[in-house]
Image: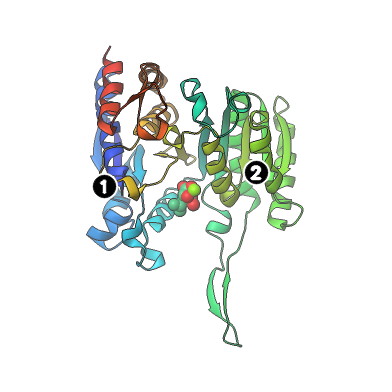
Amino acid sequence: MPRSILLMTGDGIGVEIVAEAAKVLDLVNRKFSLGLEMSEAKLGGQAYDEYGAPYPEATQVKARAADAILLGAVGGPKWDGVERHLRPEQGLLDIRADLDLFANLRPAILYPQLADASSLKPELVAGLDILIVRELTGGIYFGEPRGIRTLENGERQGFNTDVYSESEIRRIAKIGFELAQKRGGRLCSVDKANVLEVTVLWREVVTEMAKDYPDVELSHLYVDNAAMQLVVEPKQFDVILTGNLFGDILSDEAAMLTGSIGMLPSASLNTDRQGMYEPCHGSAPDIAGQGIANPLATILSLSMMLRYSLAESEAAQSIDQAVGRVLDQGLRTADIYTEGTTRASTSEMGDAVVAALSE
Ligand code: IPM
Ligand code: MG
């Protein structure tokens, strides 16, 4: 049976970058006889515009049936006035919850060709290779009760609930430990156990589990310290394991350390290894439609897809190598441009990867 890949551009630059990734996917599909069948669906603002919901049933049906999903990005100022539960971002949260995509892997890698792009000194970031494992379907993002209520004195009060059950902690920590085993053997669990009970439990459960992974060196950091350590000495980290909210914040910080958020892919997986793959950056409405966005994070998301959901590591590696070759050639989109390199548009970059793959 052919495996089915669902492509969702989403909003803003999502449209342009997924178009480039689709070219690459078509090529590797043929070149490696992967037998993949592609289809499309709408998510986020574009889905709201067409169906009145950011994760409409038409998309849900296709998403549930897909072996893997490639997403561009969602959101934009156009939908600022829309009610919260119909906003583009809600579509993203809904599909994560619907498919139980609890394991979010966000690598922060410094490409040697882009060493000058970081705002940190080159020696601090040279060779940087961190993997953030973020819990994606629990914690304060989804905890109940939540809302905005009016108190007796007429004042309004906003409230959310940060909650993690043992089983939720266990299943994400298992992913963290296993990935650490395959990488540098170090796992740093990030919490706020000096204040929040939910993370006291988090730390207890992760510590207990460490017995089953004697080859992994486990450490713990409070999130404020982790945020600081990331800019002081980022190379001390191998795998960072953390909850939904802290992972959201730390992954942006780690991505920016590389100076090239336009280069970073991500994977969101469930227990069946079904996954949604997307660039770490957002929909960048300010540059949408101009043909200057960097498609490489989306193209590299394909490589993660081939590796994690489709077990096609040879095809994945060929994409990684093609991207490396294009960077070696000196091609740069605006976000990673430095003097002495060659400026490329979104489609020129996509075409260059396709050309490198065809060699
Ligand atoms: C992310 C984004 C989302 C999140 C938003 C768009 C809902 O910031 O994927 O990191 O907070 O998870
Ligand atoms: Mg975020």
The quadrant of the rendering that contains the N terminus is top left
Quarter-of-image position of residue 186: top right
Q: Earlier in the sequence, mark 1 or mark 2?
A: 1
Q: Secondary structure at mark 2?
A: helix
Which residue is painted at 57% across and 68% down in the image? Answer: 145
The quadrant of the rendering that contains the C terminus is top left
Crowding near pointer 1: few (<14 within 10 Å), some, many (20+)?
Answer: many
Quarter-of-image position of residue 155: bottom right
Tell me where residue 31 appears, x and y as whole percent: 26, 17
**Numbered label tally:** 2
The foreground one among 79 and 84 is 79
Tell me where residue 244 appears, x and y as whole percent: 56, 50
- Taking the image as drawn, is residue 22 in sight? no
Q: Is 111 drawn above or below residue 291 in the view shown? A: above
The foreground one among 155 and 182 is 155
Which residue is painted at 25% across and 25% down in the image? Answer: 351
Q: Is residue 251 left or right of residue 79?
A: right
- Taking the image as drawn, is residue 59 in sight? yes
Q: Is mark 2 within 8 Å of ligand 2?
A: no
Q: Amino acid at mark 2?
A: Ala
In the picture of the structure, the residue carrying the numbered disc 2 is 227
Q: Amino acid at mark 1?
A: Ala
Which residue is painted at 57% across and 86% down in the image? Answer: 154
In the picture of the structure, the residue carrying the numbered disc 1 is 41
Q: Is 179 drawn above or below residue 192 in the view shown? A: above
Color style of the picture = rainbow
Crowding near pointer 2: few (<14 within 10 Å), some, many (20+)?
Answer: some
Q: Is residue 74 left or right of residue 131?
A: left
Tell me where residue 25 appears, x and y as whole percent: 29, 28
The foreground one among 197 and 252 is 252
Q: Secondary structure at mark 1?
A: loop
Tell me where residue 278 appears, x and y as whole percent: 40, 39
